[in-house]
Image (cartoon, helix red, strand yellow):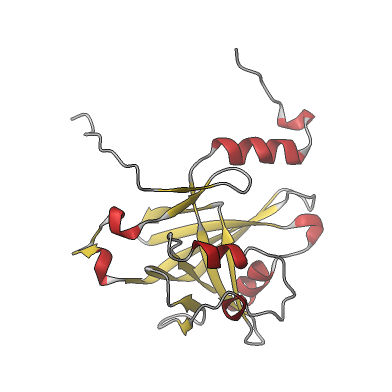
């Protein structure tokens, strides 16, 4: 028997926990950005996905708790640019380091021992150690909700350049077994993508 939950009658954190436990596995947007002062920032967001192919478009959302902005949101509002760096088993520990809350003056690339390389099209840094990077220009920033503890902003970006390691490429097809991507589950739990199977779509 199913239990029903009315978001209007529950604490925001309860609905948040239900969502992140049910909408799984979630891809991780490891977002690189640059402040107007030139400070590099790197942070993971699991409310992330690709949403269109023409033009190629991705989005991520960041909580805007009590009206305060995370460094990533402040940076992309200022510079209108960001990178997405694909999280794999090889870099998952470094990704976790960048998930902490740090002062805006902290360079998470340095903190996690990662090599920052500048974007070729946009003014935002990329993770050299990642198997793939997307350079993105912000097209829209959409506020969601009021300035409560779970209010958010959706950042939508057009992908203007893709950089992919040749070891995982077959033309424009990605070798998923070689990529070894990591996804987010609920709470502190992550998942590997080693257990894969195929289904043919109905004609």
Q: Which of 10 and 117 is in front in this view?
A: 117
Asked whether, in this view, residue 183 is left or right of residue 193, the answer is right
**Which residue is depicted at the point 45% across and 54% down?**
182
Kindly indicate the quadrant of the structure image that contains residue 98: bottom right
Q: Residue 84, image x and y in percent?
A: 47, 67
Residue 139 in view (yes/no): no
Q: Which of 36 and 183 is in front in this view?
A: 183
**Which residue is depicted at the point 65% across and 18% down?**
3
Q: Residue 104, image x and y in percent?
A: 72, 76
Q: Residue 47, image x and y in percent?
A: 56, 51
Asked whether, in this view, residue 4 is left or right of residue 136, the answer is right
Q: Which of 70 and 168 is in front in this view?
A: 168
Q: Nearer the viewer, residue 7 or 168?
A: 168
**Which residue is depicted at the point 73% across and 65% down?**
69
As drawn, 148 above or below 138: above
**Which residue is depicted at the point 64% across and 77% down?**
78
Kindly indicate the quadrant of the structure image that contains residue 180: bottom left
């Amino acid at each position: 028997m199913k239990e029903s939950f009315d978001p209007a009658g529950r604490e925001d954190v309860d609905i948040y926990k239900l969502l992140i436990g049910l909408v799984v596995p979630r891809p991780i947007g490891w977002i690189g950005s640059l402040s107007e002062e030139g400070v590099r920032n790197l942070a993971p967001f699991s409310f992330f996905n690709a949403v269109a192919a023409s033009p190629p478009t991705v989005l991520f959302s960041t909580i805007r708790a009590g009206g305060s902005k995370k460094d990533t949101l402040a940076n992309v509002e200022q510079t209108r640019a960001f990178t997405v760096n694909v999280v794999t088993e090889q870099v998952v520990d470094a990704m976790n380091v960048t998930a902490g809350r740090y002062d805006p003056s902290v360079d998470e690339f340095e903190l996690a021992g990662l090599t920052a390389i500048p974007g070729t099209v946009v003014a935002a840094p990329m993770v050299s150690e990642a198997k793939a990077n997307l350079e993105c220009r912000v097209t829209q920033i959409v506020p969601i909700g009021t300035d409560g503890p779970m209010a958010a902003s959706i950042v939508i970006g057009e992908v203007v350049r893709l950089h992919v390691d040749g070891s995982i490429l077959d033309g424009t097809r990605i070798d998923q077994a070689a990529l070894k991507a990591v996804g987010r589950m609920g709470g502190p739990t992550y998942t590997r993508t080693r257990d894969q199977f195929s289904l043919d779509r109905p004609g």
